[in-house]
Image (tube, rainbow, N blue to C red):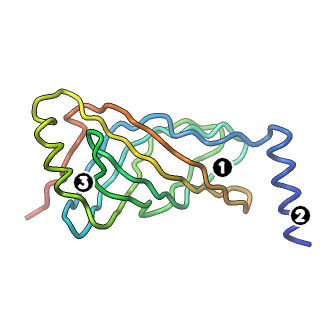
Amino acid sequence: MRRFLYLLLIVGLTSCGIYKDVQVENVRQLEFEELAETGVKGSIKVTIDNPNWFSVDIIDADIDLNLQGRKITRVRLAEPVHVPKHSKNEYLLKIQGTEANLNAVLSSAFSILFSDEILIGGEGYVEGKALKISKKLPIKFEKPIKKSDLKKKKSNP
């Protein structure tokens, strides 16, 4: 009975136009804390627009991350993010991945040296949860960012 009510709620929300997809609109900065063949840790700054009358928690993401058109790693969301209702804000998403393709990073490094902008891209999905209902949304982006917005976090001595 409970599943039927959830199904009815999902159908009701989507068919009446009450629910609108949350949009990841702008990728502005990529920062690596760790970049090694064994893994990647870092953060990515994005603008998220939630046009709904309820807040949404982004609980997971699985994205193939590209630099200059070359896949460097597959990243996941390291911690959930709360997006308030009727909001459009910039968020710093913590990401982590395994098995970075350092050959692709080095190949990209040469072209990065001679350009002002870096092409960052990704393809995968983002999973959100609202009103006890989870939904996976496909995501695909390719955005140029300023070279100064691609950072390697310096470690403290």
User: Height in image: 69 above or below 71?
Assistant: above
Between residues 70 and 120, which one lies in front from this camera angle?
Answer: 70
Residue 45 lies in quadrant: top left
The residue lying at 65 percent from left, 43 percent from top is 85
Q: Position of residue 110 (x, y in %)?
A: 10, 39
Q: Are marks 1 and 3 in contact (CB under 8 Å)?
A: no
Q: Which residue is mark 3?
A: 32
Q: CA distance from mark 1 to mark 3?
A: 29 Å
Distance of mark 2 from mark 1, alpha carbons? 20 Å
Q: Residue 55, labelled with which disc?
A: 1
Do the numbered discs 2 and 1 sit on residues whose CB atoms are within 8 Å?
Answer: no
The residue type indicated by label 2 comes to: Leu
Q: Quadrant of the C terminus?
A: bottom left
Q: Does residue 90 appear left or right of residue 86 in this picture?
A: left
What residue is rendered at 50% in x and 60% in y? 80
- Residue 151, image x, y percentages: 20, 45
Dot 3: within a 10 Å radius of its alpha carbon, few (fewer than 14), some, or many (20 or more) residues?
some
Question: Would you call the spot at circle 1 few (<14 residues within 10 Å), some (14-19), or many (20 or more)?
Answer: some
User: Is 149 in front, or is 68?
Assistant: 68
Q: Earlier in the sequence, mark 2 or mark 3?
A: 2
Residue in view at x 23 percent, y 29 percent: 117
Residue type pointed to by label 3: Phe
